[in-house]
Structures are given as C-alpha cells and as structure tokens.
Amino acid sequence: MQESGKINLKGLTRQELAGHLAGIGKERYRADQIIRWLYRQRVSEIARMSNLSRSFREHLQEVACISQIECLREQLAQDGTRKFLFQLNDGHTIETVLIGDKSRLTLCLSTQVGCRMGCSFCLTGKSGFERDLKAAEIVDQVLQVADIIDPGGSSRGVLTNIVLMGMGEPLDNLEEVIKALEILKYDNGLQFSSRRITLSTCGLAPKIIELGQRMEVSLAISLNAADDALRSRLMPVNRRHNLAALMAACRSFPYTKHRLVTFEYILFAGLNDSLDDARRLVKLIGSFPTKINLIPFNEHPELPFKKPQQKQITDFLEYLQSHNLTVMTRRSKGADISAACGQLREAGIEKSQ
C-alpha cells in the first residue's frame, strides 16, 4: 500500500529519483543503488536496502514509501495461461496475463482501469473507464508476477517479454506509460530490451508519432478493418484518426529490419473475413514493411461477433501470403478463463472471491 503524502519510490524515473535525493544532499549514484534494490532485488521495504546507511534509510522511511498492488486471485487456463487479478490502493482492480509460448514467457500488462476507446468487440471498454494507472502500478505488475512465479529470485525472474495489450489504451496514458517503459528498461533494474517490449494501440495517430520520437519500443496496431466505414463501426477511434492518418503515423515510426510495425487483424465471421476484405488489406498495406497477425475472434456470450470457419481463415491467410506479406495466424490463449484478447475487465472484489 502507498502511504499518503510520501514519495513513491517505485514510480520515479532515475532522473526524478536523483533529483529528490539531491534535494536532501545525497549523491546521484544513490539513485542507482535504490533502483537495484527495487527492481533487481525486488525489495518491498526501505529497511532492507542494506548498503544505505541506517540514518539514510530512516530518513527515507519518513519521506518515501514503496507501493505494492495486491494479488487477489490467480486463474490457470487449460493451455497454461495464468491470469492475475490485482487490487490497487484505491480498491479498483486490474487483470494481468502470463502467456507461455515455446521459449518465451510473456507478461501482458494493463495500463488503465477500464478503457474509453469503446471498441465494439472488447469487454474492457464495456466496463467503462475509471482512471489511468500510474507508472508504479504498471511496473508493479511485473514485480508481483515475478515474485509469484520465481519467489526469491532477482530482477524479472524468468519473464522474457512484455506486451502492453491488457486493459486500457496505452497511448491514452502516454506520460505514465513512457515512465514505466523507461523503468522497465534500466540496465541495473529489470533489463528488458526494446525488442522485448511491445506496445499495442487502437490507433491514436498523433500519439504514435510522439511515442516514436520519445521511446524505442516495438509497436503493434489493432487494425481489424481496411476501410474506414467498417473500422469506424468496430472502433470509434477511427472517426478521429482515420486509416490515412494511421498509416501516415506508422510510416513515421522508427522501425528496423528486426523490429517491424505489426498489424493485428481480428477476423470476425461474415464481417471482415472475405477475400474482398483481404484485397482491401493488401491495398492498404502496399509496400509498407510489416508483419500481420491474424487473430480469429475469441467468442464471448456478452458479444455478438462469431469466429470464422477454418476455411475462411485459411483462405484469408493464403491470399495475404500470395501477395508477399509476412503473416501468421495467432492462436489466442486463455479463453476459458477470459484471459484472451479483448476479454480483460475490472472485477469488483465481491466477484473475485
């Protein structure tokens, strides 16, 4: 829990932390010492930072704290996916998903309580929007899961990848997300490289440009339609930032040969899964160097959409491949515990027990 009125050490960047320490007459290198304790040793108490003097620790305890979110529940899917329900200090809850795939162990982080984007196929948005997460709450999802799956370990434990694809739109909370990404990448902390962090957005075009200017990270775009009329029906964000604006923003993003922009395309039966839809997608992408993830819709009783038949999925995939696009079908995981794409939502404490 975070103590009222105190500085939350877990939510500070190195520069912010060094600035606070300088204000009490401490050297800048003390910031790196504290960062190592927070993120490499995963300590939750200032008193355990044993290479700081006793008087320094006592002073820190008076003015600062180390916040923690609380795991209320863990669910295990048949495919091994694990979903965690965390309670925040104000009582709100968020969900975080751990996905195993061959040699990877990927953690899917939430960035908001709820979401205000209103995508018609997403349960998170149907729960409404409550608030943005602070950087400390984003980072603490990593620390708490690392403690659960690798107790007593250091740094991030056995986690290999991070995706910001959970509850909320990351670019709608850009400042706190940038801070969290900076913290996740510290060499003397959690040590995630840019290639191992992917941010997924519904298409806030101006924020995509800003993200590319401020942070090196992999980018995924939730596309789902290749014409403005259908995309605006599915995703209201397209009425503000249409496909032309979105593609222009993607072309401005600093991608590399090893870190292409990924387009995620959810396939809905009878809606966007025809060969005409595939042709429109090929025309939209053109020669832009990208990867395409086809995601057959994860059906849910609260949503009206259906998953296409396998032939429709295969035909769509093969058409894209025949036009020299790099494309794969992504098998969603955790659907039996509502941990798949678009199924995360805030759960009241009474529902979690």
Image (cartoon, grey):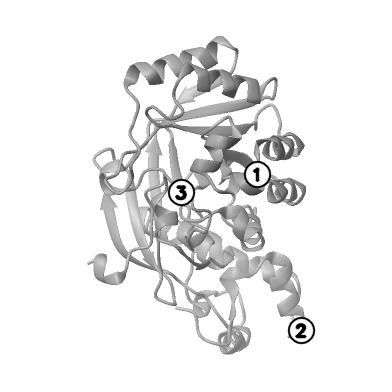
Residue 36 figure quarter: bottom right
Quadrant in which the C terminus appears: bottom left
Q: Is residue 161 visible?
A: yes
The amino acid type found where label 3 is placed reads Cys
Q: Which residue is mark 2?
A: 25
The crowd level at tag 2 (other Cα within 10 Å; few <14, some 14-19, many 20+) is few
Residue 92 figure quarter: bottom left
**Residue 285 location, x and y as percent?**
64, 25
- Circle 3 SS class: strand
The amino acid type found where label 1 is placed reads Val
The amino acid type found where label 2 is placed reads Gly
Spatial CA span between label 3 and label 1: 15 Å
- Circle 2 SS class: loop
On residue 108, which mark appears?
Answer: 3
- Circle 1 SS class: loop
Q: Going by the image, does 156 lie left or right of 249?
A: left
Q: Going by the image, does 221 lie left or right of 310?
A: right
Among numbered discs 1 and 2, the one appearing first in the sequence? 2
**Residue 196 location, x and y as percent?**
57, 41
| Callout 3–callout 1 Cβ contact below 8 Å | no
The crowd level at tag 1 (other Cα within 10 Å; few <14, some 14-19, many 20+) is some
Q: Nearer the viewer, residue 180 or 186?
A: 180
Task: Choose mark 1 or mark 2, whichever is in front.
Answer: 1
Residue at the image position 33 percent from the left and 20 percent from the top = 310
Spatial CA span between label 1 and label 2: 35 Å
Q: Which residue is mark 1?
A: 217
Q: Going by the image, does 21 lie left or right of 337?
A: right
Q: Nearer the viewer, residue 112 or 196?
A: 112
